[in-house]
Amino acid sequence: MINLEKLQKISKSTSSKIVMLIFDGLGGLPHPDTGKTALETARTPYLDKLAEDSICGLSHPIGPGITPGSGPAHLALFGYNPMKYTIGRGILEALGINYDLKKTDVACRANFCTVDANGLVTDRRAGRIATEESSKLCENLSKIKVNGVKLSVVPVAEHRFVLVFHGGGLSSDLSDTDPQYEGLKPLKAKALSKEADSMAVLVNDFIEKAKGILANCHPANMLILRGFSQIPVIPHFTDIYKLKAAAIASYPMYLGLAKCVGMKAISCNSVKEEFNALTRVYNDYDFFFVHVKKTDTHGEDGNFKAKVEEIEKADSFVPKLTKLGPNVIVVTGDHSTPALLKGHSWHPTPLLIYSQYCRKDNVRLFRETDCASGALGNLPAVNIMPLAMANALKLNKYGA
Amino acid sequence: MINLEKLQKISKSTSSKIVMLIFDGLGGLPHPDTGKTALETARTPYLDKLAEDSICGLSHPIGPGITPGSGPAHLALFGYNPMKYTIGRGILEALGINYDLKKTDVACRANFCTVDANGLVTDRRAGRIATEESSKLCENLSKIKVNGVKLSVVPVAEHRFVLVFHGGGLSSDLSDTDPQYEGLKPLKAKALSKEADSMAVLVNDFIEKAKGILANCHPANMLILRGFSQIPVIPHFTDIYKLKAAAIASYPMYLGLAKCVGMKAISCNSVKEEFNALTRVYNDYDFFFVHVKKTDTHGEDGNFKAKVEEIEKADSFVPKLTKLGPNVIVVTGDHSTPALLKGHSWHPTPLLIYSQYCRKDNVRLFRETDCASGALGNLPAVNIMPLAMANALKLNKYGA
């Protein structure tokens, strides 16, 4: 695998266009009754036609056996080694609500939660209280003063919010306060390095004050924090690939992630809107990341049927994409989300790369089983961008 | 992947013999009329028979999507990580004309070019002046004296020549003077490290003097330099693999590259001569690198038909090789050179490894499509040498 520094040296700007269509959590496991995955059950004539003209395979974001979170999975899709480049949960969450983070900010993901009389967490999500309700609580928490450091408490949805500390010289090298399991007490934030000592004091001071404010707000009578982080220094798409890139998605987190690597975020409310947006901005960019979210959501919910339907719906929009005539089309998932497991999984996910120069293989159906015999084999996802760039004739030769 | 130090510890000398037959630029893309690549179009009964008795796959020299130059591609075939071991352009060029480089020499690739009245490059190749003409200019430049350092100005072909600085303590850590694009001035050579300061002065002094000599030699009224380099320190075949290796090729650059890793260079004038040479020296070595060049040349020229014919011609000589009864036969390309792209490409190239112990797969035809389903899968080319060594029973167990 070539590293980004070397890739940057051989990449060039051309007029060719690349579309990367990502079905979140695309891969699955066979339904016990039929022996077919959701993708194998869905009727996907357009994706199948595309697969027929493409080179196919299975892609895995991190490594065999490793189930990725959305952050590393997408970084890999964008060509960043997810072991080297990491984006903290706090930053992801803040990006997800379009919060305008400064480089010096420290953000963490926060949950309102329920604790019992002994201070033990009984519900990590505070009964998923309404967003309206949690917004009011966030407003109250915003008034907390801790040692002269400015902070923002920003609602996300339901029990979720983002806590941001502003100012220079703050460290994010802190442990989570989220105990991860119910029946345990929220933890104290601990400094993981000397430099974070004062920050730990500051965070624990905030928590104590918040506890007081929330005391009578059952079920949201406490909070837990995780993923203290700062905006990572990640080389941008424009620099590495010389691409003018647009991210078209309905979920803020994916847009935020894409912004981190220098893409323009285009927010939509549905898959249909996403494909319309693609057509609308097609002349303005040369790389398009189009994100279909609900395949993952339905997988997480264990709703096999809804996942099948979502795949079929997205497939019906594929002709809108192919009609634009991009030079390269990549279709894959960021990871698998089998309804059977109700969560992300380690299984590699079907992948197709279409271009005039792809040297297509014998795969005729865009399905797990068929793609397993594709000519791309089992491909680490970080290689997808170099392949897309190569197929778009945007890479010079390496070495003489 | 095992590294060379570890490989060296487990390799052993035996009487078994390995032949590595390399078709330069072997892989291709389908012809638009037939849907078949050059290799798939060619009648290759002998290679197909060999594939039937072999384990097959596709190999890629650098990584998915990366189009290699000949240098890194061959280093990978010889088992050297092409990201770690690099051979500078100047050295490759000098090796290519069989120039007898000393370890202390610094060489660079040079072009005669055309500059206008303002000193801007209008043609980076000086109208591709005749070799005869450029040879005379090289002779004139040879007379330049720079601070007591001896230098050689050696013509290659047309506008291309090699500039070699002789003597101890010279550094090659210099930037190119080639601005890469026309409409720009040739750059000054810059020291990229402290040690190269005096060398930069020396090179820029040479350029100033050359400029004077060339002033009235339009279109070759200036020169540009790139790829300052020295013979790399690369562990030798004899040491790593305990192999007595012979390189049989018709093009100087490949022989030069092979010499760099410690092979004996055997120069030939045709593929036929190469196979005769293989028979002739067969008792004297235990590793043979046989290089077929023109498959690449015809690909570069976009001549699909000539590439097909060259493959068929080389195939007809394969029985001469198999008759010798080597324990291991490797056949592959260094990279693909599709006639459709008229240049090297990133597509992996068919690979077969034959031996009594190879555990053959179901591949029956030595073709891109068939090899894609071979048991070796998509194999990084650096793994070919360890596999060849293993099949020749020349590797001990790793670890107890």
Image (cartoon, coloured by chain):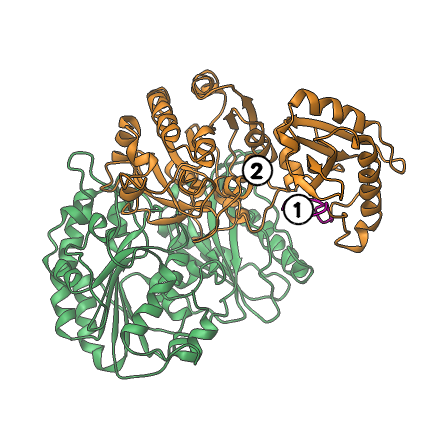
Chain colours: A orange, B green
> Who's the residue at 53% across and 67% down the image?
B105
Whether the magenta-drawn stretch holds residue A181 is answered as yes
Residue A180: image x %, image y %?
63, 46
- For this view, does B179 lie left or right of residue B381? right
* Residue at which label 1 appears: A183
Parent chain of label 1? A
- Residue found at the far right of this picture: A147
Q: Does residue B270 sit above or below A23 in this rendering?
A: below
Q: Is residue B27 left or right of residue A154?
A: left
Determine which quarter of the picture holds residue B266.
bottom left
Res A291 seen here: yes
Q: Nearer the viewer, residue A351 or A139?
A: A139
Residue depicted at 39% across the width and 26% down the height: A310
Instruction: Give how far across and how far down residue A131 sits, in percent.
Output: 65, 23
- Whole-percent x and y of residue B236? 42, 74
Q: Is residue A99 visible?
A: no
Q: Is residue B261 above or below residue B41?
A: below
Identify the mark at residue A133; answer none if there is no mark.
none
Q: Secondary structure at mark 2?
A: helix
Q: Position of residue A154 (x, y in %)?
A: 72, 27
Q: Which residues are magenta?
A: A173-186
Helix, strand or loop at label 1? It is loop
Q: Nearer the viewer, residue A149 or A169?
A: A149
Residue occupying image coordinates x 43% and y 39%: A337
Identify the residue position indicated by label 2 in the image: A239
Residue that sits furthest to the front in the current view? A117
Sequence-earlier tag: 2 or 1: 1
Q: Read off the chain for label 2.
A: A
> Which residue is rendered at x = 27% and y = 47% of the image?
A373
Whether the magenta-drawn stretch holds residue B78 is answered as: no
